[in-house]
Image: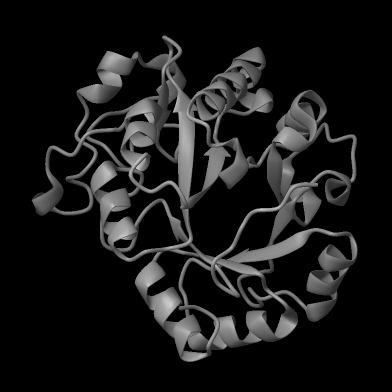
Amino acid sequence: MKKLHYKNPIPVAAHRGNAKYFPENTLISFRSAMDLDPDMLEIDLHMTKDREIIMMHDHTVDRTTDGTGLIREKTFREMKLLDAGSWKGPEFAGERVPSFREFLDWLKGWPEVLVNVELKDYPADSGDFAYEAADKAIAMLREYGMLDRITINTWSGMLNEYISAKYAEEILIHAYSPQEKMGPGQKRFVYDYAYCVCLFGTPAEPVVEKQRFDFAKSCGVEPWVFYPVDTPEKYDQAIANGAMLFTSNDPKWAMEYLRGKGLHK
C-alpha cells in the first residue's frame, strides 16, 4: 500500500479549516488554516440535486446557513445563495458555500498539503446517489492530480467497501473504530482495507486504551485521533498510547503543543 508523506513526526489536520474561529468548510476558514501551515486539511463533501459537489458537513443546511432542508434536494444555485458565515459571527456575514472545484483551484497554491476528504452522502440514506457522489468527487481529485496526497473518509462502511473494491490502492481509506460506527450492511473487517482509523472512545474516556492503538498498528493501519475539545491531558495520553495524527478544531494550539514536545516543527 502507498503511504502519505508526512513532514512532521506527528502531523496535524485542520478540521473543516480553522473551525474553532471561522465558519467551517468555507474558503475563509481554509485560508486561515493554511496561514498556520498544517500538515493536512480535513474537508466535507456533499452532492447537490443537480450533481455539483459542494463543501458542507451536515446533511441539511440548517445549522451552518440561513436556509433549511437537505443538501441533496437543493440545486447548486440554491446552495450558492445561502449565507454560510453569519451563524459563526456577524463579521462572516455573506460567506458562501464553496464548490469542491473552487476549493481545488485554490489549493493549487499548496501542492504539498495533504487532504482528508470526507464523503457525506451515504448509501443507507440516498442509495445510488451516494455512489455517484463518491465517483464524481474521486474523478475530480484525479483530474487535479491529487490522489497521491489524499485519504477518503466516510462514516459508511458500505461506501468504504465500494471504494476499496473499485479503486483498490489508488485510494487510501480513512475509516473508524469501533467499526459499528460505520453503520449496517458491512461485509468486511475494517482493518483489511483501511489505511488509517480514527479511534473513538466514550465521553467519559475519550482516549482509548493503548491496546487498540497497538492492534491497529499490528494490522498495518495508522491510528489517528480527534477530540472536539483539545486538552494537554488528552494529547499526552494519546501520544503515550501511540497516536500517529491529530485532527483538531484548533490546529494552532495542536501544533504548538506538539512542537513543545519536539513532535512538530
Q: Residue at x 55, y 72 (%)?
A: 8
Q: Position of residue 188 (x, y in %)?
A: 90, 39
* Location of residue 42 with respect to 6 vertically, above or below: above
Quarter of the rendering containing residue 209: bottom right
Q: Is residue 148 left or right of residue 12?
A: right
Q: Position of residue 225 (x, y in %)?
A: 62, 66
- Residue 61 appears in view: no
Which one is in front, 95 or 257?
A: 257
Q: Quadrant of the C terminus?
A: bottom left
Quarter of the rendering containing residue 249: bottom left
Q: Position of residue 40 (x, y in %)?
A: 48, 56
* Location of residue 35 with respect to 231 vertically, above or below: above
- Residue 102 appears in view: yes
Q: Is residue 89 left or right of residue 231?
A: left
Which one is in front, 185 or 162?
A: 162
Q: Residue at x 59, y 73 (%)?
A: 10
